[in-house]
Image (spheres, grey):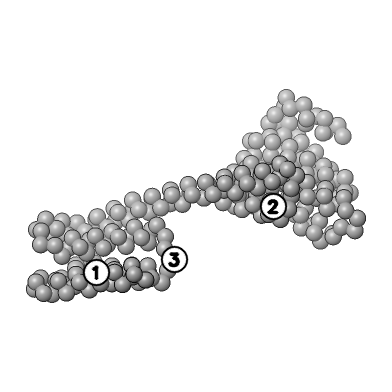
């Protein structure tokens, strides 16, 4: 609230100063003033983000420079549209890069925490949600592959219980298959993705799910083409 009134006082003071020294407000000055007021209102009514803050401070700088008594600004004021356009491109590039980097970092943090729980065979809702969030934030095949493995373990835990819910089983199976296919689509040249998907389908074939065995064999053939020296693949194909 203090910042809001401070910025409002700054805008009013600059306008009054321009009027008092009889400098007046030209069309360019009015455009800068209106733009500053627009960003000022955005700051108050919208959630703060880097792009909004950078653009706002940039135009506040233009406003301050425009109403200084230095002649240099009057010469450079003709370049204002070029400067603004260039700054917007730079700020936009920085924001996009920062956004992608921040998402990748957040995905790595969320994945590390969820994977730690999964390594202890703790496959609760928190673990699944964490792996799901990591796979959504960053398109890395390892995130989706680990999610499939965790869900596969959950399927075994669910089916081990007597009188398990079929709807819960179907939901878990569907989510696991979707994650496994996503991993293979992200990096189809990684044999581990196809092998992981084959292990998942092999588990489904034990539950007498139709065409699961055929899907497992198809995934194993793709994994063998990518990694012919992997001894696990022919062992699984023989079963």
Q: Earlier in the sequence, mark 2 or mark 3?
A: 3
Please say if 224 is above or below 7.
above
Q: Which residue is mark 2?
A: 128
Where residue 10 is drawn, which disc sits there? 1
* Nearest to the observer: residue 52 or residue 17: 17
- Of the 4 image quadrants, the one containing the C terminus is top right
Across and down, in percent, residue 160 comes to 87, 50
Q: Is residue 126 above or below residue 190?
A: below
* Residue at screen point 76% across, 35% down: 221
The single residue placed furthest to the top in the displayed view is 229
Image label count: 3
Query: Given this view, does label 1 or label 2 mark the residue nearer the observer?
Result: 1
Q: Residue 211 — which label?
A: none
SS for callout 2: helix
Disc 3 to disc 1, how far (Cα)?
Answer: 22 Å
Mark 2 neighbour density, 10 Å: few (under 14) some (14–19) many (20 or more): many
SS state under label 1 = helix
Q: Which mark is residue 47?
A: 3
Q: Say few, some or many: other residues with alpha carbon within 10 Å of mark 1 (under 14 / 14 to 19 / 20 or more).
A: few
């Amino acid at each position: 609230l203090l910042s809001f009134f401070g910025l409002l006082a700054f805008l009013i003071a600059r306008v009054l100063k321009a009027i008092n020294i009889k400098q007046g407000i030209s069309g360019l000055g009015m455009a800068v003033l209106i733009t500053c007021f627009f960003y000022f209102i955005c700051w108050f009514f919208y959630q703060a983000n880097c792009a909004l803050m950078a653009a706002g401070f940039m135009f506040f700088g233009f406003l301050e420079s425009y109403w200084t008594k230095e002649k240099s600004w009057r010469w450079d004021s003709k370049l204002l549209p070029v400067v603004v356009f260039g700054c917007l491109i730079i700020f936009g590039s920085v924001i996009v890069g920062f956004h992608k980097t921040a998402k990748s970092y957040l995905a790595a943090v969320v994945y590390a925490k969820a994977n730690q729980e999964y390594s202890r065979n703790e496959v609760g809702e928190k673990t699944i949600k964490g792996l799901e969030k990591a796979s959504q934030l960053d398109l890395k095949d390892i995130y989706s592959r680990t999610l499939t493995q965790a869900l596969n373990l959950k399927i075994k835990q669910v089916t081990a219980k007597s009188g398990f819910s079929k709807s819960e089983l179907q939901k878990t199976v569907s989510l696991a298959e979707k994650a496994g296919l996503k991993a293979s689509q992200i990096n189809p040249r990684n044999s581990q993705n196809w092998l992981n998907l084959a292990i998942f389908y092999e588990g489904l074939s034990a539950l007498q799910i139709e065409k699961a065995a055929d899907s497992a064999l198809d995934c194993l053939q793709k994994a063998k083409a990518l990694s012919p020296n992997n001894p696990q693949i022919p062992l699984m194909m023989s079963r």
